[in-house]
Amino acid sequence: MARGKTERRLRFTDRGIRHLTLPQPPTQLDYWDETLAGFGVRISYGGRRAWQVMYRWNGIKRRMTLGDYPTVPLGRARDRAKEIIEAVKLGRDPSQEKLKARRAYSFREIATAYLEEYAKKEKRSWKHDERIIDKYLNPKLGSQKAFEITSDDIHAVLVPIAQTTSVRANRTLEITSKLFNWAISARGDNGQRRFPDIIANPCAGLSPPQEERSRERELKESEIRLLWDALEPESERVQASVKLLLMLGQREMEILGMHTRELDGEWWEIPGERAKNGLSHRVYLPVEARELITRAIGSGTGYVFPRRNSSDFPATRGFIAGPFADIRQRAGLPDVWIHDLRRTMASRMTEIGIPRLVVGMVLNHSDKSITGVYDRYAYANEKKDAMLKWMHRLMSIAHN
């Protein structure tokens, strides 16, 4: 037998492939299927049987390996060879497509770039994006090549989330779509596309998994009293954080991020970088709120609600979320969520005659109207008056 490679033709069968004669070193044998031109198996003297397909592209022979037998059975190898041969007939070069796939970015790599190069710089809510990516997207899509991800892949991620909460499923779709749109448009320092293999957004055309309904839950006066009483077993700081949410109506992370440097006597200045709408905001602190803050921080300085293992950082959402689950169960209010406290305050304030405009100023709602943009009046007196009226009403409810 000649040294190097030799070729033979036969009708491929599973039994026949298993019993093909091994060549002598250092020879390799190529067998070609009589029923499918270009489909073959290469046998080495060590016994390896590797499927292959041969085709011509622009007059040049190209060879692609399809995997080893028996890991890849005959039927699957033949089907793959047919796909490759058909692709060539349609004007595509499968070996270049394979090379492109090998060099292409994974979803995890795209997601990391999106967070570092875009979200952390442009989005105040980037941590929310990061949580969604880490919890829902990377576990299912992380290892896939981003350009190969289809709408069916996205749908498969969303369905189990939607079975738990439609809001989170819808946010996941929004973040995924934003991520792919960014990847499509992202440019490098040379002006060239960062991810040229991504040419389409697989989220395009997908509808939100479920229709969202605006949550309307607010606490009745009797429920406020139940919740207030249910705080008793908790630590002083947990009690203070929940009470301040209801007293001041500010957002959860704004309360948890409170620092002594933001406190100025009767006022609390929330800096723009911590406010959801990016606008600095002054909150009047009635005496009851100031007492809670003083007891929580003691005589020291720093974060009013520090992280458990590091006083250099504010508490995370878990500081309230875990205890609040127990609090609402003790109160017999399993359907009440933390954000419902802010809504409750707003509703009760309008109920006692405080104008909606002032309530919006107290809550730091964004006003995108022309008047809102140019009206820089701080409404300090109105906000103080509103907070004093609300605190009087809240205390009468809680201690009645």
Image (tube, rainbow, N blue to C red):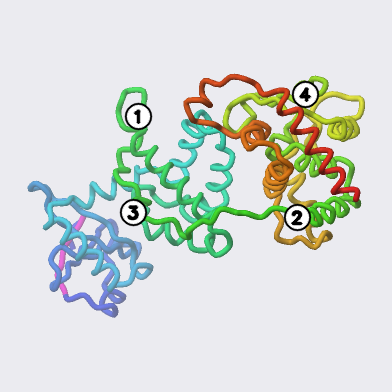
What amino acid type should be assigned to the residue bearing mark 2? Lys
Amino acid identity at mark 3:
Gly
Per the image, the residue denoted by label 4 is 267
Which residue is more in the foreground, 337 or 133? 337
Q: Is residue 201 left or right of residue 82?
A: right
Residue at 51%, 49% (x, y): give it: 171
In primary-sequence order, the first of circles 4 and 1 is 1
Q: Which percent across, then down, holds residue 285?
A: 80, 29
**Callout 3: SS:** loop
**Which residue extends farthest bottom?**
15
Residue type for callout 4: Trp
Q: Secondary structure at mark 2?
A: loop
Few, some or many C-alpha atoms within 10 Å of disc 1 (few <14, some 14-19, many ≥20)?
A: some
- Above/below status of 22 relative to 300: below
| Residue 77 x, y percent position in the rendering | 27, 67
Tag 2 or tag 4, which sits nearer the N-term?
2
Q: Residues within 10 Å of mark 2 (few under 14, many from 20)?
A: few
Q: Amino acid at mark 1?
A: Arg
Q: CA distance from mark 4 to mark 2?
A: 28 Å
Say whether disc 1 or disc 2 marks the residue closer to the N-terminus.
1
Is label 1 or label 3 in front? 3
**Nearer the observer, disc 2 or disc 3?**
2
